[in-house]
Image (tube, rainbow, N blue to C red):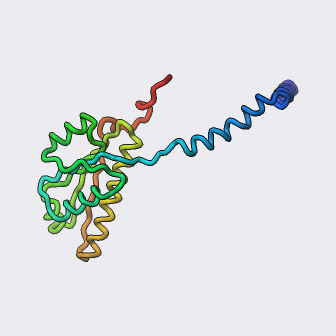
Amino acid sequence: MKQFIAFIHKEFYHIFRDNRTLLVILGMPVVEILLFGFAINMEVQDIRVAVYDPTPDALTTGIAERIRQNSYFNYQGNVQSMEKMEASMRKGELDLAVVFQQNFQESLVHSGEGAVQLLSNSSDPNRGSIAATYATAIIAGYQMEQMEISEIPFQIKTENRMIYNPLMKSSYMFVPG
């Protein structure tokens, strides 16, 4: 134990004797906090999104319009088939796809439930999950507004499906060097 304490005294003596080492030890963390605090922005914007709506109706059009008007999304329009949607996702042209179930409004009226599937490109897990969360929040907000207007209780269920990295492993994104 005496050797360890002597070692610590020696190191403190060397650190406080050399001004450059002291500057590196105390100054660098402050510089990094200030620099990275302004340089790193984790906010996700310009999410390229498209909608697949097999049977367009007033509710699906309203939700699609809300997504189009949102500043976080770059609305790419409606896609006519799932094949085109999947092809666009594979090419990297889309970050998020909103897929409405067949006869969405009719299902809401008769059973009180409707389903929306959110397909997010999770090759970047952070961007994919945030994109799906933004879309889920927009859909939930639209649902609340419609329930206040119609006073008929219904539930829009969103199912998130992460593609291209379903395990959401961020280690696939890091390249050493």
Q: Measuring 85% from the left and 24% from the top, which residue is drawn there?
A: 3
> Where 26 sits versus 21, above or below?
below
Q: Quadrant of residue 13?
A: top right
For residue 163, what is the image quadrant?
top left
Residue at (22%, 38%) from the top-left corner? Answer: 88
**Front residue of this view, candidates 148 and 34:** 34
Residue 39 placement (x, y as % from top left): 53, 42
- Give the residue drawn at x 32%, y 54%: 135
Residue 60: x percent and y percent?
Answer: 20, 60
Q: Nearer the viewer, residue 17 or 60?
A: 17
Left or right relative to 31: residue 86: left
Spot occupied by residue 84 in the image (x, y as percentages of width and height): 16, 40
Is any atom of residue 2 visible in this view? Answer: yes
Left or right, 25 with respect to 63, comes to right
The N terminus: image quadrant: top right
- In the picture shown, does residue 4 fall above or below 107? above
| Left or right: 5 as drawn, with respect to 137 | right
Residue 143 on image: x %, y % = 28, 66
Q: Residue 175's image quarter?
A: top left
